[in-house]
């Protein structure tokens, strides 16, 4: 399938003005196909040739202005059109195929009760899997949909849905929106409905999840109302759509999608097992993020995909900031700092890095654009905006945003448009700021140099990088009454120049025990500590008063490990010392995740890895000794202890008892987690796994069973899992991921080694056959990181030259191989 190029999109936008889509979908034609009929009214400004896109299973009929076109003229996904100047009407009727990969019209049958659910995910170019379209973001139009579904189903869409009888539904016409934002969800939904600000609000999920949604409905709706009201305080443009539905849908590839009026979320956010307050905060942040998109992305939409940051970076920043301002979740930036920001730092140091706002020539087509939905467009972009607000001031920032909304409402805009709006509201040179921050790649590093003389001390900041930074300077001293605690001195702020060493800053009095650059985490940069400050941090990190300050220090330690400047075992020692005293669960979760998945599984091998797992086991037990049921760090520690177990004794005792001593009781999530680790250790079998699936026959249970079966250290189990992943196309996106995450285990190197040579050709074939979503899953979850060595690196580098490798798989393998290269360098540095 040819990807749409930027030049093609610009040419078509100059030719066409698209007015209206009338779409009829019939979802009653069987388990494999649905009927799609589309009528498009548009104007050709001049005579010319162009094309319309669709990916049908069978194209039955096409007419242009009432005259038939030959369906055989469809070339891959493009139907050519020859146009005269003036008004036109195109009509197409086709059978379309349901998806099992979360792209297009996804179809899912709930194993728990046999009910079927459908929903669309039309991002980038998947609208063509559902209806005929001029598929690019700057050809906005009005959409009217009629949907025929089984009579017992409910249909949801971008506008209020009106039942017509006999299973037919008419969705209210939309305002002008882009093709990729059209949404439909159909099935026997369980719904919770209310009203706010004169608009209908709704929550929807599968019937089997109804008790869990009901339990959390008021929490979710409370967050929704609070964010909605706060955005109306920030933005002069009112919410631009007629309703606000949030549907939690199965087997969703992303966290959520900002379809106007019908936001779709992965239904893991309907919690069926115990979760921490940090996880509830994450769900709330996603609610806030997607609502921000109603303005950033839906009301004002990017013109071309090089400006995806105008959607994602803004929604990410606004999500965290608005949640902090409007809800009970007050420490969201700590979670961002330790749980999200590293995603940006990691992506920005790989060969595949790109600017937050890349040059248009760097995004020549939709295939390349799809690769930029990463930690740079989200986490780095949000960090850049946080730095912009710190430098510009929130008043001028919001004034610029509102100018942008007013000028481009229901239209499209570019980076230049946005910067012009900011420039109209401030005397600051925002264009130069953007050139430094949005058009460059890489991570700056800030290193303090401290000298003392008499009753003065002097700070010089060595700046390795090209961006200006507005930072807070944290100065802390040991508490004389308790040397494990640190107390802050008066806060200072610094403006660092774009390049070179910052001018010395001279202060009077004794130097502080701890000097921390980028306190409050206002900028995006790696920071280092001077030796005296690092010694203080090692002794008293957990004694710092603010969790965001502690997050900056943990990130500094993380970066030092990844850069080979701090031994992985030293990071573990710091975690062992300070994490049992940590009260912020986001920090506990972030530090344990890095220690377990990166340090133990990638940066250490052999005896060192065994010792690391023992340290993590002891650390988690210490946290359990200091916490009670219901405290977030306790559940986080239980999960980490399970994944770190090297013998089955404790896990088997817990599983047989149905509880961790003193709690928590084992809910389905913990039972599957324990059983998966027992499978890795060879301490369970197919029979016990199948019995657990009988106990929990849900979709989540089915994924847990697939993960456990694949994790067994048994040749037949491994071969069956491999066959399911790569030799057939039967697995859905979620079952593929579950099988892949079970398959590769560092404890099973001997039995896994024969699969190394099979992986790269099999993944290449799978990606070409099943598309970008499965390509991403194959490169992300099925990559053989458990065999992290020079042979894997060599085979992987060779695979990048395969002529049939897809862009999505190439990008994912490039990133994985860079991570592998880094892991091998860390091992060599600390051998």
Image (cartoon, rainbow, N blue to C red):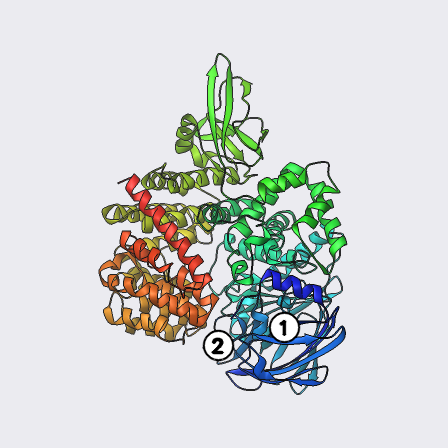
Q: Give me the C-alpha separation between circle 1 and circle 2.
A: 39 Å
Q: Nearer the viewer, residue 800 or 481?
A: 800
Q: Nearer the viewer, residue 368 or 15?
A: 15
Residue at 29 percent across and 44 percent down: it is 827
Q: Residue 799's x, y, as percent?
A: 35, 60
Q: Is residue 348 above or below residue 659?
A: above
Please tell me in which quadrant of the rendered image residue 285 appears.
bottom right
Query: In the picture provided, is 335 more to the left or to the right than 648?
Result: right
Q: Earlier in the sequence, mark 1 or mark 2?
A: 1
Q: Nearer the viewer, residue 350 or 521?
A: 350
Label ID, residue 51: 1
Please tell me in which quadrant of the rendered image residue 292 appears.
bottom right
Residue at 36 percent across and 36 percent down: it is 565
Q: Residue 474's x, y, as percent?
A: 53, 30
Number of residues whose C-alpha sits closer than 10 Å to that of mark 2, classed few (under 14), some (14–19) or many (20 or more): some
Question: From where the camera sits, is residue 312 visible?
Answer: no
Q: Which element type, helix, strand or loop, lies under badge 1? A: strand
Label ID, residue 110: 2
Query: In the picture provided, is 65 more to the left or to the right than 30?
Result: right
Label ID, residue 302: none
Q: Nearer the viewer, residue 626 or 523?
A: 523
Q: Is residue 567 above or below residue 805?
A: above
Question: From where the camera sits, is residue 61 visible?
Answer: yes
Residue at 43 percent across and 64 percent down: it is 777
Q: Which element type, helix, strand or loop, lies under badge 2? A: loop
| Picture quarter with the C terminus | top left
């Amino acid at each position: 399938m040819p990807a749409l190029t930027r030049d093609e999109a610009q040419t078509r936008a100059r030719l066409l003005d698209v007015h209206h889509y009338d779409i009829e979908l019939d979802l009653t034609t069987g388990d494999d196909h649905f009927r799609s009929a589309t009528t498009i009214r548009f104007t050709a400004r001049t005579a010319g040739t162009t094309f319309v896109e669709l990916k049908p299973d069978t194209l039955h009929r096409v007419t242009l202005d009432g005259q038939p076109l030959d369906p055989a003229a469809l070339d891959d996904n493009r139907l050519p059109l020859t146009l005269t100047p003036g008004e036109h009407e195109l009509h197409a009727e086709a059978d379309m195929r349901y998806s099992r990969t979360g792209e297009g019209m996804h179809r899912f049958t709930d194993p728990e009760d046999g009910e079927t659910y459908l929903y669309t995910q039309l991002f980038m170019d998947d609208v063509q899997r559902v209806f005929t379209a001029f598929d690019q973001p700057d050809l906005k139009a009005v959409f009217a949909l009629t949907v025929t579904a089984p009579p017992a189903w409910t249909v949801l869409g971008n506008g209020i849905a009106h039942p017509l009888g006999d299973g037919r539904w008419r969705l209210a016409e939309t305002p002008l929106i882009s093709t990729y934002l059209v949404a439909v969800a159909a099935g026997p939904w369980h719904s919770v409905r209310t009203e706010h600000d004169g608009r209908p609000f709704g929550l929807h999920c599968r019937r089997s999840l109804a008790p869990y949604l009901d339990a959390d409905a008021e929490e979710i709706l409370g967050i929704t109302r609070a964010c909605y009201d706060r955005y109306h305080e920030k933005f002069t443009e009112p919410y631009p759509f007629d309703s606000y539905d949030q549907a939690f849908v199965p087997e969703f590839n992303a966290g959520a999608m900002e379809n106007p009026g019908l936001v779709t979320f992965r239904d893991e956010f309907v919690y069926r097992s115990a979760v921490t307050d940090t996880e509830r905060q994450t769900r709330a942040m996603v609610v806030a993020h997607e609502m921000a998109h109603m303005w950033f992305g839906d009301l004002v939409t990017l013109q071309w995909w090089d400006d995806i940051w105008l959607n994602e970076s803004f929604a990410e920043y606004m999500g965290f900031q608005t949640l902090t301002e409007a809800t009970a979740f007050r420490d969201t930036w700590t979670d961002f700092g330790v749980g999200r920001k590293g995603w940006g730092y990691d992506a920005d140091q790989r060969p595949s890095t790109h600017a937050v706002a890349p040059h248009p020539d760097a995004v020549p087509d939709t295939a390349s654009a799809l690769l930029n939905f990463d930690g740079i467009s989200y986490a780095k972009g949000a960090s850049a905006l946080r730095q912009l607000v710190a430098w510009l001031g929130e008043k001028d920032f919001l004034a610029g945003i509102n100018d942008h909304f007013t000028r481009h409402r229901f239209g499209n805009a570019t980076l230049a448009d946005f910067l012009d709006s900011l420039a109209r509201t401030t005397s600051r040179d925002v264009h130069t700021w953007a050139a430094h921050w949005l058009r460059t790649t890489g991570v700056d590093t800030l290193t303090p140099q401290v000298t003392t003389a008499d009753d003065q001390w002097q700070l010089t900041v060595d700046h390795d990088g090209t961006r200006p930074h507005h930072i807070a300077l944290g100065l802390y001293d040991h508490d004389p009454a308790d040397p494990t605690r640190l107390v802050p001195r008066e806060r200072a702020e610094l403006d660092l120049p774009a390049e070179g060493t910052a001018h010395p800053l001279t202060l009077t009095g004794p130097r502080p025990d701890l000097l921390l650059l980028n306190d409050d985490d206002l900028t995006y940069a790696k920071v280092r500590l001077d030796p005296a400050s690092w010694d203080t941090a090692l002794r008293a990190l957990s004694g710092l008063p603010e969790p965001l300050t502690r997050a900056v220090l943990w990130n500094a330690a993380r970066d030092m490990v990844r850069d080979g400047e701090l031994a992985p075992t030293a990071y573990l020692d710091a975690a062992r010392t300070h994490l049992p005293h940590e009260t912020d669960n986001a920090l506990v979760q972030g530090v344990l995740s890095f220690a377990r998945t990166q340090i133990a599984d990638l940066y250490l091998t052999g005896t060192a890895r065994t010792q690391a797992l023992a340290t993590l086991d002891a650390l988690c037990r210490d946290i359990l000794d200091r916490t009670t049921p219901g405290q977030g760090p306790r559940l986080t520690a239980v999960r980490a202890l399970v994944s770190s177990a090297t013998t089955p004794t404790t896990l088997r005792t817990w599983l047989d008892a149905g509880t961790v001593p003193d709690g928590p009781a084992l809910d389905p999530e913990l039972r599957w987690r324990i059983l998966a680790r027992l499978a890795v250790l060879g301490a369970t079998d197919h029979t016990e796994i199948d019995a657990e699936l009988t106990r929990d026959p849900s979709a989540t249970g089915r994924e847990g069973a697939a993960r456990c079966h694949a994790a067994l250290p048994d040749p037949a189990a491994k071969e069956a899992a491999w066959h399911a992943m790569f030799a057939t196309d039967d697995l859905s996106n979620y079952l593929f991921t579950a099988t892949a995450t079970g398959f590769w285990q560092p404890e099973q190197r001997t039995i896994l080694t024969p699969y190394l040579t099979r992986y790269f050709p099999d993944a290449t074939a799978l990606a070409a056959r099943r598309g970008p979503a499965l390509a991403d899953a194959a490169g992300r979850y099925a990559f053989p990181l458990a065999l992290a060595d020079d042979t894997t690196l060599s085979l992987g580098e060779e695979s990048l030259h395969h002529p049939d490798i897809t862009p999505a798989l190439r990008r994912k393998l490039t990133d994985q191989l860079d991570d592998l290269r880094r892991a091998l360098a860390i091992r060599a540095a600390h051998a």
